[in-house]
Image (cartoon, helix red, strand yellow):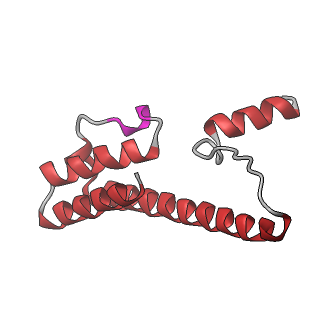
Amino acid sequence: MSAKERIKRYRETGGASDLVRVEVLVPKAHRDEILNVAAELRSAHRAEKSRLVEFIRIATERYGLRIFDNIDIEKLNDLPQKARVVANALMERGDARAYAMGRKMLSQLGNGH
């Protein structure tokens, strides 16, 4: 696989699949500020993704077949879409703790998406 193909694959399905390249013109004196803001945005985005992945992992461990009996989240490409499906399944099919976890997931999705 060539470097160009690897980069293309990374941008389409890898760690950068939900990021976009932005080019802006700013005064030279404020360049570092813009870079810092961009780094903070990326960090917050990664933390949000990590929380959603952790919610899905916990839901799978605790409730497994009870909520996933006819759901295949692996067919969904988008992490927020997977989290929304899992949250709805938790709220519909789980106990009170599952319902609370589903509400947390949905509120997390509401803030970021």
Is 16 left or right of 99, judged from the image as shown?
Answer: right
Q: Nearer the viewer, residue 15 or 36?
A: 36
Does the segment drawn in magenta span residue 74?
A: yes
At x 56%, y 60%, the residue is 46
Figure check: 84 above or below 11:
below
Picture residue at 80% right of the left edge, 62% below the top: 27
Q: Nearer the viewer, residue 49 or 37?
A: 37
Q: Nearer the viewer, residue 45 or 5?
A: 45
Of residues 108 and 85, which is closer to you in this image? 108
Q: Which residues are magenta?
A: 72-76
Predominant secondary structure in magenta?
helix
Examine the image and state in which quarter residue 55 appears.
bottom left
Residue 71 located within the stretch drawn in magenta: no
Question: In this picture, is 37 found above or below 24?
Answer: below
Residue 65 placement (x, y as % from top left):
25, 46
Residue 2 on image: x %, y %: 87, 29
Residue 63 x, y percent position in the rendering: 25, 56
Q: Position of residue 12 (x, y in %)?
A: 64, 34
Which corner quadrant holds the N terminus?
top right
